[in-house]
Amino acid sequence: MAQNAEHVLDHFELFRGPEYQQMLANKKKMFENPRDPAEVERIREWTKTPEYREKNFAREALTVNPAKACQPLGAVFASVGFEGTLPFVHGSQGCVAYYRSHLSRHFKEPSSCVSSSMTEDAAVFGGLNNMIDGLANSYNMYKPRMIAVSTTCMAEVIGDDLNAFIKTSKEKGSVPAEFDVPFAHTPAFVGSHVTGYDNALKGILEHFWDGKAGTAPKLERAPNEKINFIGGFDGYTVGNLREIKRIFELMGIQYTILADNSDVFDTPTDGEFRMYDGGTTLEDAANAVHAKATISMQQWCTEKTLPFISDRGHEVVAFNYPVGVSATDEFLMALSRISGKDIPEELTRERGRLVDAMADSNAHIHGKKFAIYGDPDLCYGLAAFLLELGAEPIHVLATNGNKAWEEKIRALFAGSSFGQNCHAYRGRDLWHMRSLLFTEPVDFLIGNTYGKYLERDTGTPLIRIGFPIFDRHHHHRYPVWGYQGGMNVLVKILDKIFEEIDKNTNIAGKTDYSFDIIR
């Protein structure tokens, strides 16, 4: 082989060597059941046609590359937002490895989570013993302040009762009777990661506010001047939550961030391993019941949590991933109204700078056509910002979007002259998006890392915004909410536009009539 210790080749060079090329060719011939290349190419071209699109959109029993993950991933994401909390997934080790790797690959940080290690015997006889041993091991080995339990498919299919299992585990001495073990049932075969986030957060608040599982008495509400804030499942949680804290502090508002995972996904390298870092303190989580209001930055991430909070007497307000000028205006005006605090001059000036930047670049974005996919709130927020920029979000696809989301985003399109040819697609996947891109091409695609296959296949340039972003680093450190976040999104879009202009006008003496120094 071409690899040697004196000159180590990276994989993209190594696998181009003749011996590897021959090995791959033999593998294809002997094990991959190859078909006639001409027939493969004929079918490939047919899949780009309106005829195939009609068949593609008619399918009901198959999902191809959905733009979502499963519930327990969202539950783990929410759980690590609380002080010293260890997520505990009642299911198999392989499932938990997926959640940990998904989060680690996006945030480039260790992601702590344990499982009850259910195997075939637990699938037949139930996972109670796994819970008893797992909670004991987790409590003694990792010294958490709280263990937050969720479930996988296996535990849900056989009907394991978390409430009963946790009570029995405490009776058996796995953890002290007063130790906090909130839980949520998060069946991975329904909903998505945003559903799991919602279920887990509601379960934690029920635990502290209503004394669920008998750990604490139900708290009587004594309203104060604080505002609770919920970010939702967000791949930009590090940058976004820090930006939100800055805004609250500029306005002089007392606040509690519920499920604050901004630090645990951005720990420093200074010689100390932080298994738990930051997070909403358990005391603050309990006292959050006394707040005067609760704000959710993502409506579709908190469909169950917000009604639960509203029933406790809070005013609740939900937004849809506010990106850009108008959406941030609405957020700040709601903050000002609820808190009685004025919007400071510093934020007003930030608004003006974003408006100025949009005006400076309007000629390059106006009229451009985009396709967007991702979580429902993200899709809505990005579509609203594109309309604000004079662009057209032609295709907006949310695999985990529901009918209410579809109706709301259609109303958004109807309210803008740039939205007249735009369409929303709920419950569709990235193979549907492929048909849309071939039959109704757009200028740019916005979505997560998985869109790079659509970019390669359809030639539609990808702007990476969403979760997960595996093949680029550190995007999560920069906010996309607020005026500052809108500026970051604007720059990201413009950079891609300019890169494509340069790419398509770079042949000297032939196409370089637009290979300009000044844009």
Image (cartoon, helix red, strand yellow):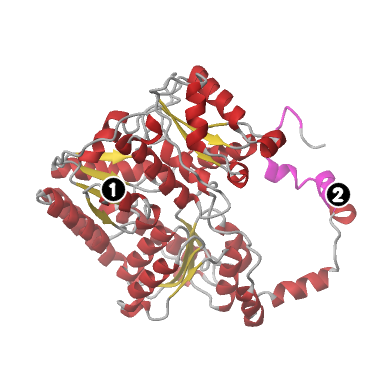
Q: Label 1, on which residue? A: 309
Q: What residue type is labelled 1?
A: Ile
- Alpha-carbon distance for marks 1 and 2? 62 Å
Provide residue 88's location: percent of width, then percent of height: 51, 33
Name the quadrant containing residue 263.
top left
| Foreground of the two, 322 or 196 | 196
Residue drawn at x 33%, y 78% is 414
Report the side of 418 relative to 186 (left or right). Answer: left
Residues rendered magenta in the picture: 4-25
- Answer whether residue 518 is visible to the viewer in this image: no
Q: Which of marks 1 and 2 is nearer the N terminus?
A: 2
Name the quadrant containing residue 450.
bottom right
Q: Assess disc 2: are there few (<14), some (14-19) or many (≥20) residues with their C-alpha within 10 Å of its C-alpha.
A: few
Instruction: Residue 424: say if magenta.
Output: no
Report the side of 478 relative to 90 (left or right). Answer: left
Q: Is residue 83 above or below residue 371?
A: above
State the SS at label 1. helix
Q: In which quarter of the image is the C terminus?
A: bottom left
Residue drawn at x 43%, y 43% is 200
Q: Is residue 380 above or below residue 391?
A: above
Q: Is residue 229 above or below residue 417?
A: above
- Answer whether residue 454 is visible to the viewer in this image: yes
Provide residue 492's location: percent of width, then percent of height: 40, 56
Q: Assess disc 1: are there few (<14), some (14-19) or many (≥20) residues with their C-alpha within 10 Å of its C-alpha.
A: many
Instruction: Residue 17: say if magenta.
Output: yes
- Mark sitting on residue 350: none
State the SS at label 2. helix
Provide residue 416's location: percent of width, then percent of height: 31, 77
| Foreground of the two, 139 or 248 | 139
Q: Label 2, on which residue? A: 22
Q: Is residue 428 above or below residue 239?
A: below
